[in-house]
Amino acid sequence: MRSRGSKKRKTRIEKKGKTMRERRTSGRYGGRGGRGSGSSSRSASSKSTKKSKDSKIPERKTLSDYKYAIGTAKQAGDYNKITNYLILHIRKTYEQGGDIADALEALQEYDFSSVTPTLKSPNVVPNDASNPTAAEIAEIERQKDQNKLEYEIKAQMHLEHEGLYRTNKDKAYAFLFGQCTTGLQHKIEAKTDYDSKIKGNPIELLSAIKENSLSFDDKKKPDIIVLDALTNLLTTRQKDDEELTDYTKRFKAARDLFKEKNGGTMKIPKLAENDSLWSTDQDGAY
């Protein structure tokens, strides 16, 4: 017959074993402090990090982010991006802003001659030009009055159209000049033809902005400027988040900048000789 103390020890051992099995089971399947918990935590952390990267919201751009500055080799491609954004803003926010926006894109004044109204002539042709009938004369007079009224209305609208265009020119000049850095403003104001040609004219202003935005530091030696432009052209690459059309515009800007600083195209005769599609009269120019 076993003693009462022996039974108590057996009961305590069984309870201790059961508690240890519960702890192992809890840890294995995700309980606090177990291996399952660490794996689950790491997995959740990894998913959370991946989700935060995938759902990253791009930084919102405002007008203050689109500023013209005196150009460098790396910044030259920004001119097209800034200009497109600012002209789109003008087109969307100005009353009948399409006219001045088109003029800025083309860098030339809007052609109002194509929309200038003209006084129409009556389209009645009498059977006998030397002796028209009373009905024909009445119809001619009616059409004359009608055409004159239409012409006066269109002429008035045309004058208002031209007046609004001039107003938008003044607004566009102030707007574009305000989108220049202080250094660029001073450089434009220092031009000899600023007062006579640029001031108050947004088209001439944009031309001056383009000239300075696509120019390097004129204190550098000419050969260094050409090499900088060539390096910029050869290292222009499409960015990960950049559309092909945007990259193409940036590449063309870098190409035009090199042509301007180099004084023309770059000639590589040996490469041209190996290109069967290249015309011999182009003298290996790229």
Image: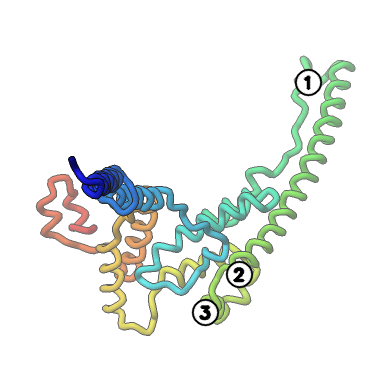
Q: Which image quarter: residue 11?
A: top left
Above or below residue 264? Residue 38 is above
Kindly check if marks 2 and 3 are in contact, taking CB atoms under 8 A apart as contact: no
Q: Amino acid at mark 2?
A: Gly
- Residue drawn at the location 86% of the way across and 25% of the way down: 142
Q: Secondary structure at mark 1?
A: loop
- Looking at marks 2 and 3 on the same chain, the residue that comes earlier in the sequence is marked by 2
Q: Which residue is mark 3?
A: 183
Q: Nearer the viewer, residue 54 or 110?
A: 54
Residue 106: percent from the left, percent from the top?
Answer: 52, 54
Q: Amino acid at mark 1?
A: Ala
Residue 263: percent from the left, percent from the top?
Answer: 31, 69
Q: Nearer the viewer, residue 239 or 32?
A: 32
- Residue drawn at the location 83% of the way across and 24% of the way down: 140
Q: Which residue is mark 1?
A: 129
Left or right: 204 as drawn, with respect to 22: right
Looking at the rendered image, the quarter that the N terminus falls into is top left
* Closer to the eye: label 1 or 2: 2
Residue 126: percent from the left, percent from the top?
Answer: 78, 18
Q: Which residue is mark 2?
A: 178
- Residue drawn at the location 46% of the way across and 72% of the way down: 212
